[in-house]
């Protein structure tokens, strides 16, 4: 008997490759942006933005909190709240309105997920590379 899901294997493999090709440039962009923000906020170790687990501890540090607060980003739902709070503070430190940190929250509305991703990437780019 032929497995009905056998034909889906190439589809899932193709989707995985596509996601990989999207995830790598986004990770590089995100790391460059947060490294630039950390540099402009005069943090001594901006290279932490490139280290996959250490970069979550960079957010509370840039928001003027202790690095241990980064463990909260490992808790579902709580991570969204603290990500917004910390990016709000980081944006204000860079002289941008803090409410811009609410852009990713739009992603919880099903049909606006892609818009939230694009808006967040644009906003983080402005905060990183455009001085106010």
Image (cartoon, rainbow, N blue to C red):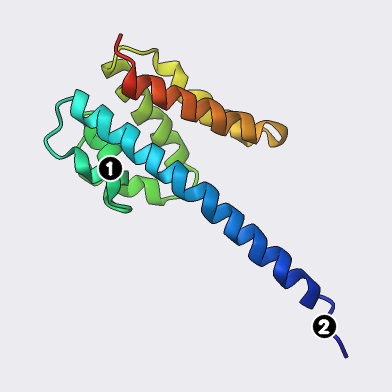
Q: Residue at the spot x=19%, y=29% of the render?
A: 39
Q: Residue at the spot x=68%, y=65% of the render?
A: 12
Q: Earlier in the sequence, mark 2 or mark 1?
A: 2
How many marks are shown on the rendered structure? 2
Question: SS for tag 1?
Answer: helix
- Which residue is most to the right? 1
State whether residue 105 appears in this view.
no
User: Marks 2/1: CA distance?
Assistant: 44 Å
Quadrant of the rendering where the N terminus is positioned: bottom right
- For the residue pair 98 and 82, the one nearer the viewer reads as 98
Which quadrant holds residue 132?
top left
Place of residue 60 in the rendered image (x, y in percent of width and height, measured from the top left): 27, 36
Q: Which residue is mark 2?
A: 3
Q: Residue at the spot x=30%, y=12% of the render?
A: 95
Q: Residue at the spot x=23%, y=45% of the render?
A: 48
Q: Which residue is mark 1?
A: 49
| Vertical order, 76 against 124 (above or below) | below
Contact between labelled residues 1 and 2, with CB atoms less than 8 Å apart: no
Which quadrant holds residue 36?
top left
């Amino acid at each position: 008997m032929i497995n009905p899901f056998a034909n889906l294997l190439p589809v899932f493999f193709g989707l995985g490759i596509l996601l990989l090709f999207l995830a790598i440039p986004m990770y590089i962009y995100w790391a460059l942006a947060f490294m630039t923000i950390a540099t402009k906020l005069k943090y001594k170790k901006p290279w932490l933005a490139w280290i996959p687990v250490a970069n979550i501890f960079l957010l509370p540090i840039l928001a003027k909190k202790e690095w241990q607060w980064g463990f909260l980003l490992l808790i579902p739902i709580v991570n969204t709240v603290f990500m917004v709070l910390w990016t709000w503070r980081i944006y204000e430190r860079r002289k941008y309105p803090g409410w811009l940190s609410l852009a990713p929250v739009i992603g919880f509305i099903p049909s606006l997920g892609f818009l939230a991703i694009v808006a967040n990437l644009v906003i983080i780019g402005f905060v990183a590379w455009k001085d106010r």
